[in-house]
Image (cartoon, coloured by chain):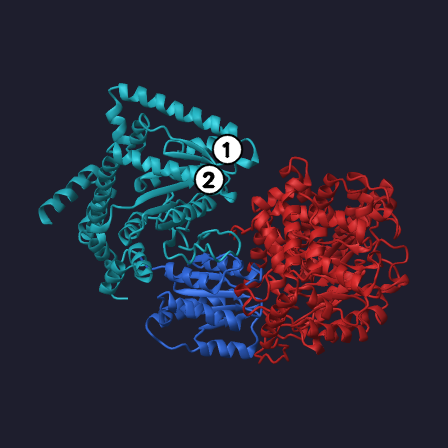
């Protein structure tokens, strides 16, 4: 497919053009960048909802039920599901694509023109997302999806990158998951705008809800303390988004929804909470604030990446030279860096 | 970054024998492909739509029900109907397929048919060779 | 054995190792550094009495017909009566299958076994778009009682026993069989046969999935409850390891998961208040017989011993008949190769011998062309002849359990049992003491699927890397043009079947159908036994799809998570 066909196809609502655009973006083709430039103006309308949580808590089922519910409300839904990919072979097993009730054709989400599902490999990247997840979301956004659901890898690592792309982050848990040191370490307790305790029929859900409540309360106390100390700003710089979450929790207390996603129980409440959170972001001005922050970070990282590329490609020779000098104990790494920066300033 | 070969491993129809499909999916992953497995009991429409949305290079259809002559052409027809381009997508069929049906499937545009007992290495080699060939618009030789 | 004698033996063995074996090993070595069974059990160079010293003959083996039945459930075994040669068959329309059955009965087969097509197995009518291309393909299509009337035309139900390989709609098929019996005037208590009716293994392996796990078990328990009262000679379930093995499990997993499922069903029945001594004789099992000869024999012997102990000691069954594990065996379909297909006759022979040496009650031998398509008539005949040759020419069935006392076989029987128990205890722990909860939890968590998938991938890797030889596939290959006469189902079958279904729907009493289906819905909603309503629905020609449709409405449908 040629570039102009893709761009036109995107405007005309052609699924295949969207699919191919994603492929270009995901693989960092020059065409991908071009497409992003052309469609960017159309982005910024979708509500991006992230879903994260440990393996086996029912993320995929929850996503499927959310898609179904949003469709019933007439929203168009894009889904990006990220799965782990090996950094060594590059191989990946992707997707538990939308799970539907049996063989019922009438509610077929796979065939619904208002639904688009794309699986992505993390390609060995940590943090729970693929490198290009942000751009893929933008493509779906530009294509006109009202809601974009992003499901993270869900390998139980610290999957906090979701806050970098999502307006609303949902953390899915299940009963008997409280007090687990792994959860605390994974950092997902700080990032939720909404918490879901799924598989509530298993029993023990109340305990998990109670435990979550106390964790969230502790969070808020920490916010109070931090905001009163002079070190608050310093902290914010260091831990970025996480602190921003804490600050926000003073006017948004994350609700805890119990669900049995298998049976669709609690999904209405979850959708309500998602919409309420989006309204809160919009009315409080937080949405803009968060997007400013997110985009600064993104532009910053593009710059970093570009400089890296310049160093590796254009300045490869002088870069190797200064490294060699450090190896030979002729200069120290700081001096080496200073020289390279001077070089960049004068010659580019 | 080098473009990864994406493969849709699809179970179409009502048979529940997924041992072959799952083992192949695993081996393809280990060979460095990005593999999307559809799960069981998919209709031709669903498989076709997934192939288009996931923009895969290869669609591998596994079936043991004997319904390949009905279902495989259907998958291909729907891929085109949903805007997919069969001229650059490699279509493979795996499962119990008798010899004269293999010929017929190939005439319909299926790139390769793999019967039980085929070393998976051979499937991997076939994909590595056939995907770029097809992208360049070459005819199948197999 | 006395300790003194064991010590003596150990010394003798050491002497042999040093003076006889060692110099020989130095000169010639062995073919491989390690030998193992298909389950990965390490096989020693040799077994002697020290390996079986912990086994007590009376306690652990005993005579046939005596607890724990390691040597067989009957005192005379095949000296009294040979196993039932039960070839699984069915294709096309009911007329086609009826003709094939009559042929098989004439050929000397002693029991019928029905293969259904996929739509029937999934509870989908032939006229559904989902059935397109699959009607009559891998078995016979059944939509209504009319199909059963044709299927059993000229076959008196009081003279045959019929096995039905069907699971989610097992209740419907049992009801149809009973209805045919009623029509023929055969008293229900005389009906003999088996419905597979084992949903748990569907979740683990075979994937014929319609309703969620818990309602599936509920309906199976309904069938138990109804069956002990109404069809006391009918096997109400065939607890199956066959498909678990076909999905790629090891022999140990097959044994362990099958026994675990069996325990789960028994616990469900006990919870329902069914008298275990009434139900137990109506339980049957179904195993796979694969290539590793001794491992398979050990598996069958271990299964019998385990089940006897479980039923007697864990569930308190009092009637010795309740302790018997009676089983059907099918040779391993997954072991057949498309390459050099005649080799499959040899594989099947070895597997059939293992089943007979393991004391099976009935046996299906695969046809050599089954890696390709439905078996041809000639291939089916060879498969049946294989059993007949074992029965009448080999002398194998003339003495009972001839491998008992083999140091290797007894050691391996014991080993299989121990490894299987490890799994069972793990499952019991998952269910906090309940096997029923444990198995359901294992399904929910994907435990069984993961275990089986892992084994399947390991097996394949061994084959790919040449560590495991498959003759004709990765060794001793030839250039060959595959030329097997293959039975292909006429595409007309689908059209004819749909036409018949339409005709029935037009002719039947729709009011009566509606009434019966409403009864079924209310029975399901009110947690009553669904069997009487299903029997009524069948008799007024409700379709299988309509009956299953009601159950799906009430219980929901199940979609299996993707676990690779």
Q: Is residue B102 left or right of residue C434?
A: left
In the rendered view, would you say C284 is above or below A1? Answer: above
In the rendered view, would you say A166 is above or below C96? Answer: above
Considering the numbered disc 2 on the image, is that residue within a helix, a strand or a loop? loop
Residue shown at the point (76%, 66%) measured from the top left? C112
Q: Which mark is residue A211?
A: none
User: Quadrant of the rendered structure where residue C148 is?
Assistant: bottom right
Considering the numbered disc 1 on the image, is that residue within a helix, a strand or a loop? loop
User: Quadrant of the rendered structure where residue C276 is?
Assistant: top right
- Chain A palette colour: cyan
Q: Are marks 2 and 1 in contact (CB under 8 Å)?
A: yes
Q: Which residue is mark 2?
A: A54
Query: Label 2 marks which chain's residue?
Result: A
Give the chain ID for the red colour.
Answer: C
For this rendering, which residue is in front, A272 or B38? A272
Instruction: Name the residue furthest left.
Output: A346
Label 1: few (<14), some or many (≥20) within 10 Å? many
The C terminus of chain B appears in which quarter of the rendering? bottom left
- Does any portion of residue C19 appear in the rendered image? no
Give the chain ID for the blue colour.
Answer: B
Label 2: few (<14), some or many (≥20) within 10 Å? many
Q: Which residue is mark 1?
A: A177
């Amino acid at each position: 497919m040629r570039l102009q066909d893709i761009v036109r196809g995107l405007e005309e609502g052609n699924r295949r053009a969207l699919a191919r655009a994603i492929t270009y973006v995901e693989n960092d083709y020059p065409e991908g960048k071009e497409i992003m430039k052309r469609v960017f103006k159309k982005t910024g309308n979708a509500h991006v909802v992230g879903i994260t949580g440990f393996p086996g808590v029912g993320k995929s089922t929850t996503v499927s039920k959310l898609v179904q519910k949003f469709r019933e409300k007439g929203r168009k839904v894009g889904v990006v599901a990220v799965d782990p990919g090996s950094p060594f072979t590059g191989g990946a097993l992707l997707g538990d694509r939308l799970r539907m009730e049996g063989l019922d054709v009438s509610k077929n989400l796979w065939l619904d023109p208002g639904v688009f599902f794309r699986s992505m490999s993390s390609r060995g990247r940590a943090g729970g997302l693929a490198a290009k997840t942000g751009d893929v979301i933008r493509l779906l956004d530009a294509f006109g999806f009202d809601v974009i659901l992003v499901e993270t890898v869900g390998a139980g690592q610290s999957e906090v990158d979701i806050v970098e792309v999502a307006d609303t982050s949902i953390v899915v848990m299940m009963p008997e998951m409280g007090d687990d040191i792994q959860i605390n370490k994974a950092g997902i307790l700080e990032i939720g705008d909404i918490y879901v305790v799924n598989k509530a029929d298993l029993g023990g859900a109340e305990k998990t809800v109670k435990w979550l409540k106390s964790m969230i309360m502790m969070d808020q106390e920490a916010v109070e303390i931090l905001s009163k100390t002079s070190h608050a700003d310093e902290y914010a710089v260091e831990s970025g988004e996480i602190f921003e979450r804490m600050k926000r929790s003073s006017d948004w207390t994350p609700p805890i929804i119990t669900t049995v996603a298998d049976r669709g129980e609690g999904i209405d409440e979850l959708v309500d909470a998602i919409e309420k959170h989006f309204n809160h972001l919009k009315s409080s001005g937080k949405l803009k604030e968060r997007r400013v922050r997110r985009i600064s970070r993104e532009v910053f990282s593009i710059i970093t990446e570009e400089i890296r590329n310049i160093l590796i490609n254009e300045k490869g020779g002088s870069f190797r030279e200064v490294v060699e000098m450090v190896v030979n104990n002729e200069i120290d790494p700081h001096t080496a860096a200073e020289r390279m920066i001077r070089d960049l300033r004068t010659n580019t | 970054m080098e473009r990864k070969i994406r493969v849709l491993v699809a179970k179409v129809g009502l048979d529940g024998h997924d041992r072959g499909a799952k083992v192949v999916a695993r081996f393809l992953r280990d060979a460095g492909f990005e593999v999307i497995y559809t799960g069981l009991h998919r209709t031709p429409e669903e498989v076709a739509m997934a192939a288009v949305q996931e923009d895969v290079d290869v669609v591998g259809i596994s079936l043991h029900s004997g319904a390949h002559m009905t279902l495989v052409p259907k998958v291909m027809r729907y891929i085109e109907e949903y805007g997919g381009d069969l001229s650059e997508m490699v279509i493979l069929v795996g499962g119990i397929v008798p010899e004269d049906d293999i010929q017929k499937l190939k005439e319909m545009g299926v790139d390769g048919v793999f019967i039980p007992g085929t070393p998976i290495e051979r499937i991997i080699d076939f994909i590595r060779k056939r995907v770029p060939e097809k992208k360049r618009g070459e005819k199948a030789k197999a | 054995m006395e300790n003194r004698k064991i010590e003596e033996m150990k010394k003798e063995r050491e002497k042999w190792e040093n003076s006889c074996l060692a110099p020989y090993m130095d000169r010639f070595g062995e073919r491989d550094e390690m030998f193992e069974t298909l389950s990965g059990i390490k096989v020693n160079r040799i077994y002697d009495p020290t390996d079986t010293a912990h086994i007590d003959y009376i306690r652990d083996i005993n005579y046939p017909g005596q607890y724990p039945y390691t040597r067989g459930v009957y005192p005379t075994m095949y000296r009294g009566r040979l196993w039932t040669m039960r070839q699984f068959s069915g294709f096309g329309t009911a007329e086609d299958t009826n003709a094939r059955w009559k042929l098989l009965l004439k050929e000397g087969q002693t029991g019928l076994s029905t293969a259904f097509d996929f739509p029937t197995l999934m509870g989908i009518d032939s006229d559904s778009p989902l059935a397109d291309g699959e009607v009559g393909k891998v078995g016979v299509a059944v939509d209504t009682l009319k199909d059963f009337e044709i299927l059993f035309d000229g076959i008196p139900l009081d003279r045959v026993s019929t096995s039905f390989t069907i699971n989610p709609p097992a209740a419907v098929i049992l009801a149809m069989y009973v209805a045919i019996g009623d029509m023929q005037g055969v008293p229900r208590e005389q009906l003999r046969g088996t419905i597979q009716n084992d949903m748990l293994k569907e979740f683990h392996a075979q994937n014929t999935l319609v309703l969620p796990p818990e309602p599936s078990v509920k309906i199976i328990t309904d069938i138990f409850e109804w069956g002990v009262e109404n069809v006391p000679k009918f096997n109400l379930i065939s607890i199956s390891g066959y498909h678990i093995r076909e999905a790629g499990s090891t022999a140990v997993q097959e044994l362990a998961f099958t026994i675990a499922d069996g325990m789960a069903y028994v616990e469900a029945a006990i919870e329902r208040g069914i008298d275990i001594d009434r139900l137990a004789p109506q339980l049957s099992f179904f195993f796979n017989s694969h290539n590793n000869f001794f491992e398979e024999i050990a598996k069958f012997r271990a299964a019998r011993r385990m089940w006897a102990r479980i039923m007697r000691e864990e569930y308190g069954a009092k009637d010795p008949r309740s302790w018997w594990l009676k089983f059907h065996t099918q040779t391993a379909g997954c072991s057949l190769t498309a390459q050099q297909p005649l080799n499959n006759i040899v594989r099947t022979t070895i597997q059939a011998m293992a089943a007979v040496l393991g004391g099976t009650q009935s046996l299906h031998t695969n046809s050599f062309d089954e890696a390709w398509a439905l078996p041809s008539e000639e291939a089916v005949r060879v498969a049946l002849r294989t059993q007949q040759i074992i029965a009448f020419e080999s002398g194998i069935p003339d003495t009972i359990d001839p491998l008992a006392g083999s140091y290797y076989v007894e050691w391996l029987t014991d080993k299989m049992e121990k490894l299987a128990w490890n799994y069972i205890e793990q499952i019991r722990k998952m269910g906090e003491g309940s096997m029923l909860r444990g198995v359901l939890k294992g399904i929910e968590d994907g435990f069984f699927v993961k275990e089986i998938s892992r084994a399947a991938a390991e097996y394949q890797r061994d084959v790919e890397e040449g560590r495991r030889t498959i003759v004709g596939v990765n060794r001793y290959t030839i250039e060959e043009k595959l030329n097997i006469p293959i039975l292909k189902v006429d595409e007309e079958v689908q059209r004819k079947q749909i036409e018949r279904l339409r005709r029935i729907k037009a002719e039947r009493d729709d009011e009566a159908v509606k009434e019966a289906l409403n009864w079924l819905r209310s029975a399901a909603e009110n947690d009553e036994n669904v069997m009487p309503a299903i029997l009524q629905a069948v008799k007024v020609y409700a379709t299988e799809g309509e009956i299953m449709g009601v159950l799906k409405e009430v219980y929901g449908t199940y979609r299996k998570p993707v676990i690779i």
